[in-house]
Image (spheres, helix red, strand yellow):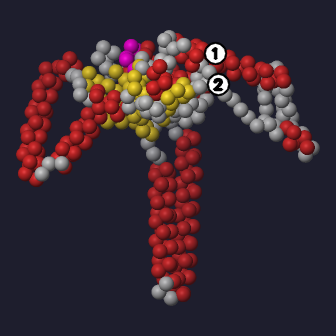
């Protein structure tokens, strides 16, 4: 039995090594492919939210009824569906563009420090603008972000500005947080809807970095910073910072803050910008009082209400997974399964 246990351990190690090698190769291939692949390797996906809401409601209704009532209910439901399908066909035959209901297009944005989802947002906005009717349709962006790089969030906000420029009503829905760069995006909307305890505001600019100059000096390590241009480098991590460099850095921050305040004022003129642009944040109810938000409501409530009289579509951009990425995921799953099964087999063998 001991020989079998040792052989099993050797076999498990061999398989684990092989799978690990496969994962490394797949990751390397994936990285190389990403460096070469085109920017537009993905596709727009559309989900009809009305169908999701209806299916959830019908599932619950069917579950809470007794067996006898459920049969009659299902029969009536099939009859109702058949009638709706027939009516939809008749409208389509007469001219669907005039007969169709208003549409609400929903886009999600989960922000990080680099606003990495801006590329997906750009594609979704382009797709919506190609089909939306400014006279009847609207757009909702479900926004969650604590902010990040100024230029990244400025570009993301510019994507939402494209919707405003086409005269499409735009609503920003905030369930948790839209602060700093996140609020820069939210303020573009015609209307901001926030949950009662969502965090809004933080209209300010911050920059921080460590400096190891004294540590290097104590250890007799020289660090040279060579520049062409008086303010090419103001503050550094390893070099000696000067009062002149610090002043220039602060001036740049103040100028960025000024632009931020101007941007918010242009899109939300009712806001007392001097009062709110202190870097502070407000919860939903407080934000309502200082005009940083227009209504208290969760995104779920907003969309469910819209489903009553509109066709609601969730629009998202999904990047296609490459073969190496799929192989990497599969290899990792196999490795975990082999390891766990091998461990269980060895443990069982040792206790026989």
Residue 95 is at least partly visible in this image: yes
Q: Position of residue 29 (x, y in %)?
A: 55, 50
Residue 217 in the image: above or below residue 165: below
Residue drawn at (57%, 41%) of the image: 35
> Badge 2, how many Cα within 10 Å: few under 14, some, many 20+?
many
**Alpha carbons under labels 1 and 2: distance apart:** 10 Å
In depth, the one of 29 and 179 nearer the eye is 179
* Residue 282 belongs to magenta span: no
**Which element is circle 1 on?**
helix
- Identified at 57% across, 46% down, the residue is 32
Magenta range is 166-172
> Residue at the location (79% across, 32% down)?
236
Q: Residue 259's quadrant in the figure?
A: top right
Residue holding disc 2: 205
Residue 60 is tagged as none
Please provide percent x and percent y for residue 64. Answer: 18, 48
> Please, which residue is most extreme toward the right here?
220
Residue 263 visible here: no
Q: Earlier in the sequence, mark 1 or mark 2?
A: 2
Q: Residue at x 54, y 16 (%)?
A: 264
How crowded is the residue under tag 1: few (<14 C-alpha within 10 Å), some, or many (20+)? some
Q: Compared with residue 243, is residue 224 higher up or lower down, i.e. above or below?
A: below
Q: In the displayed structure, does residue 271 sit left or right of residue 105?
A: right
Element marked by disc 2: loop
Residue to which mark 1 is pinned: 258
Q: Position of residue 204 (x, y in %)?
A: 62, 23
């Amino acid at each position: 039995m001991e020989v079998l246990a040792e052989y099993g351990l050797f076999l498990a190690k061999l398989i684990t090594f092989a799978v690990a090698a496969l994962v490394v190769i797949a990751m390397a291939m994936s990285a190389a492919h990403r460096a070469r692949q085109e920017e537009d390797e993905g596709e727009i996906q559309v989900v009809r939210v009305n169908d999701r809401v209806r299916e959830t409601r019908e599932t619950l209704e069917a579950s809470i009824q007794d067996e006898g009532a459920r049969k009659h209910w299902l029969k009536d439901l099939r009859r109702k569906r058949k009638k709706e399908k027939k009516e939809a066909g008749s409208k389509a035959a007469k001219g669907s563009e005039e007969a169709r209901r208003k549409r609400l297009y929903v886009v999600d944005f989960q922000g990080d420090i680099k606003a990495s989802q801006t590329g997906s947002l750009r594609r979704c906005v382009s797709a919506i603008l190609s089909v939306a009717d400014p006279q009847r349709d609207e757009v909702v962006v479900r926004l969650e972000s604590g902010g990040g790089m100024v230029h990244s969030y400025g570009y993301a906000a510019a994507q939402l500005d494209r919707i405003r420029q086409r005269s499409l009503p735009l609503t920003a829905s905030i369930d948790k947080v839209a602060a700093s760069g996140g609020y820069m995006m939210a303020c573009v909307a015609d209307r901001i809807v926030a949950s009662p305890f969502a965090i809004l505001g933080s209209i300010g600019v911050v920059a921080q970095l460590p400096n190891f100059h004294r540590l290097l000096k104590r250890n007799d390590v020289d660090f040279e910073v060579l520049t062409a241009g008086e303010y090419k480098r103001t503050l550094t991590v390893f070099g000696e910072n000067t009062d002149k460099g610090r002043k220039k850095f602060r001036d740049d921050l103040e100028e960025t803050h000024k632009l931020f305040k101007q941007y918010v004022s242009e899109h939300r003129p009712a806001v007392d910008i001097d009062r709110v642009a202190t870097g502070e944040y407000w919860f939903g109810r407080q934000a309502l009082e200082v005009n940083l938000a227009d209504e208290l409501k969760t995104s779920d409530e907003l969309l469910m209400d819209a489903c009553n009289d509109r066709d609601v579509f969730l629009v998202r951009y999904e990047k296609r997974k490459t073969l190496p990425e799929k192989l990497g995921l599969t290899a990792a799953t196999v490795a975990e399964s082999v390891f766990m099964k091998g461990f269980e087999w060895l443990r069982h063998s040792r206790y026989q």
